[in-house]
Image: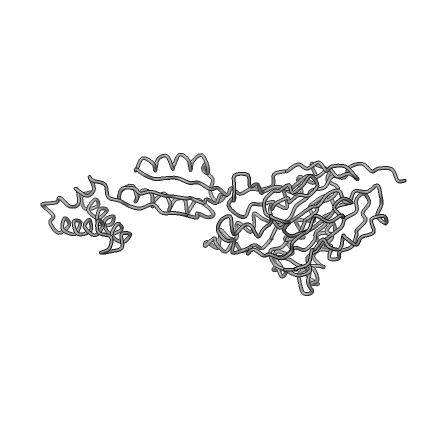
Amino acid sequence: MASPLPPVTLLHSADWQIGKPYARVSDPDKRALLRKVRLQAIGRIATHAAVTAADLVVVAGDLFDSPTPGAADVSAVCAAIGTIPCAVLVIPGNHDHGAPGSVWHTPYFQAEQGRRAANLQVLLEATPIELERVVVLPCPLLRRTDASDPCGWLNGLNWTELPKNKPRLVLAHGSVHGFGATDLDAAGEPDDDNPGDASNRLRLEGAWLEHVDYVALGDWHGLKRVSEKVWYSGTPEADRFPRSADYRCGQVLQVQLGRGVVPQVSPLATGNLGWHPLRIQLQQDSDLERLEVQLDALLGGRIGSDLLLLEVDGSLSLAGHRRYAELLERLDAQLLRLKLRGRCEAAPGDAELAELTQRPGDPLVARVAQELHRCLKAPGDADPTVVRLALSELHQTVAQLQG
């Protein structure tokens, strides 16, 4: 019987989705920056591979966002992978599936792979790959959606034909029972770049699971331990707002892998962007100061490094609401994306109403203000949002004339 081999160190990653369009970001320059940051994460994976002396880097699907990425993305990815100081194994996922005509079969990709990434191996067949110290069992997706189990072929494998002293590593992409990327739409805003899909369901309850040592999964973009030897790594660069307090992304997994032993799994940070949720109730103008303190703590002075989901409720005075609008304008310039949820209304305070409606020297302004106030008190007569906007504009005009 062959003697046991020393543990293998591998880095488990997935869902790079290079070329992701970021359809919800309106500014084309910011979209380009977000795409660039995803490429730069490969360099941080290369650094971790060097520091940990990794034997292998595996990407469990969706290296590209599309089965037909542009030539520039292909060249950039191959060049970045070429800097990783060990072998890199990749399976296609649902976004970059391995059907005929997809990127993996094109002469351009194959030439760039040979020229820039000799360490890269794309696994397009469901068959065991025996390496020097590990056996890899790839479950590639050969079409975007597949009703059959991508891991199903493992049920018919003759395990006695595999080396007994080498750990067995499964690479797969898809959702597991009760959990997967299809859960995203139910948890928050739909992801236009990554629509949910009920196919590609992985059935991990088969007897084959007893014969393997680690299952490296892709598809879910957050870190997830399914069992002691089944993990989602999450994407190495965050691409969405967290769905829950325990949602983690922006890492790779360092895995110490041996035959017949529980794998040792440790996350290593690779993310560079901040995706921040913040909820606030604005009930008085002084709450704006509290909001700015929270934003300073969250964002610091960074420009072009953060995305913010700001959930707002409440109302401010006319002057306070103008300050709020100016704050949003500054945030929009500072952030890669500002997503607003909820609404902050403008409600004139008593002093502001008196200033507008009690103007003996300016009866026209007073009459207009009085009529707008009446409409605000009787919502059926006019759209309250339009009325508040008109009052705010009138208040600002008066303030400018007085100034």
Q: Between 297 and 220, which is closer to the camera in this rendering?
A: 220
Q: Which residue is farthest bottom?
A: 101
Q: Position of residue 143 (x, y in %)?
A: 66, 61
- Left or right of 231, for residue 380: left
Q: Residue at x 66, y 45 (%)?
A: 13
The count of marks equals 0
Q: Position of residue 264 (x, y in %)?
A: 71, 36
Q: Between 58 and 304, which is closer to the camera in this rendering?
A: 58
Q: Between 164 and 368, which is closer to the camera in this rendering?
A: 164
Q: Quadrant of the C terminus?
A: top left
Q: Quadrant of the N terminus?
A: top right
Q: Position of residue 176 (x, y in %)?
A: 64, 49
Q: Which residue is farthest left?
A: 360
- Left or right of 218, for residue 373: left
- Left or right of 397, for residue 52: right
Compared to residue 41, the image places residue 93 above or below, namely below
Q: Position of residue 100 (x, y in %)?
A: 69, 65
- Left or right of 167, for residue 289: left
Q: Residue at x 76, y 44 (%)?
A: 210
Compared to residue 28, the image places residue 215 above or below, namely above
Q: Between 129 and 245, which is closer to the camera in this rendering?
A: 245
